[in-house]
Amino acid sequence: MSCDHGDVSDEIGLPGAASPRHGTAGLSTLLERALRVAGTAHAGQHRKGTDIPYVVHPLAVVLILTRAGIDDDETLAAAILHDVVEDTDWTAERLQREFPPRVVELVAALSEQKTTSDGEPIPWETRKREHMQRLGASCSAARAIALADKLHNARSLLYDAEAGGVCWDRFNAPRDRILDRYREAAERLGGDEPPLARLVTELRETIDRLSAVD
């Protein structure tokens, strides 16, 4: 699936790329709409094994991306919405009616396929492997969002570990396998663009710290 619209700098949203702001509080109408959809779609959901509202996660992903130098509205909107199709009752078709094609393409690239065409659940290991293969072949913007997603998840685990320990039993795979998945993301999703390089570096540093905590 292609999400290549313009040159690389425009695609990944390097500082200086056009980013018109027309909404409230300095937000574009696109970002305002994405925030409202994500807030409604994820209402009542919580981060796994916690009482933290789930919507904190996509907002943290956006913050990580902006700190890495990405300011393209469509990339940031896709980051806000990256789990909406995968984890809520929003469909890709509904997203297409509400958002620009590139946002929808990015969300599609970031969404795991959890069931077969017959509705049978796909084993965790299989879907993670297939999803990583698709992401590795995706555009820079999709890979940046995926790296920021992994980075926030890893930082959340590190925060829990340093605050008293991670309950690894709440996950669908053992500790070492989860850490291996983060390492694979750092290995396969990077690139020469400065934002990607920074995200990979920060992810690897977080993995190293997390690996050192019991």
Image (cartoon, grey):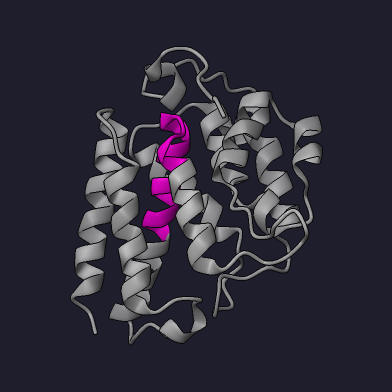
Residue 137 among those drawn in magenta: yes
* Residue 62, percent from left and from top: 48, 44
Q: Residue at x 56, y 40 (%)?
A: 109
Which quarter shows the C terminus? bottom left
- Residues 24 and 31: in front is 31
Total numbered labels placed on residues in the image? 0
Residue 32 among those drawn in magenta: no
Quarter of the image holding residue 206? bottom left
* Residue 118, percent from left and from top: 78, 58
Q: In the image, 196: left or right of 39? A: left
Q: Residue at x 64, y 59 (%)?
A: 114
Q: In the image, 204: left or right of 145? A: left
Q: Residue at x 18, y 75 (%)?
A: 212
Quarter of the image holding residue 16? top left
* Residue 47, percent from left and from top: 56, 70
The relative height of residue 14 versus residue 123 in the rendered view (above or below) is above
**Would residue 203 be visible to someone looking at this image?**
yes
Q: What secondary structure is the stretch in magenta mostly built from?
A: helix
Report the residue that reaches farthest toward the top.
Answer: 6
**Would residue 23 be visible to someone looking at this image?**
no
User: Which segment is the magenta one?
Assistant: 135-152
Q: Residue at x 76, y 32 (%)?
A: 96
Report the residue that reaches farthest toward the front.
Answer: 118
Q: In the image, 182: left or right of 124? A: left
Which quarter shows the N terminus? top right
* Residue 63, percent from left and from top: 44, 46
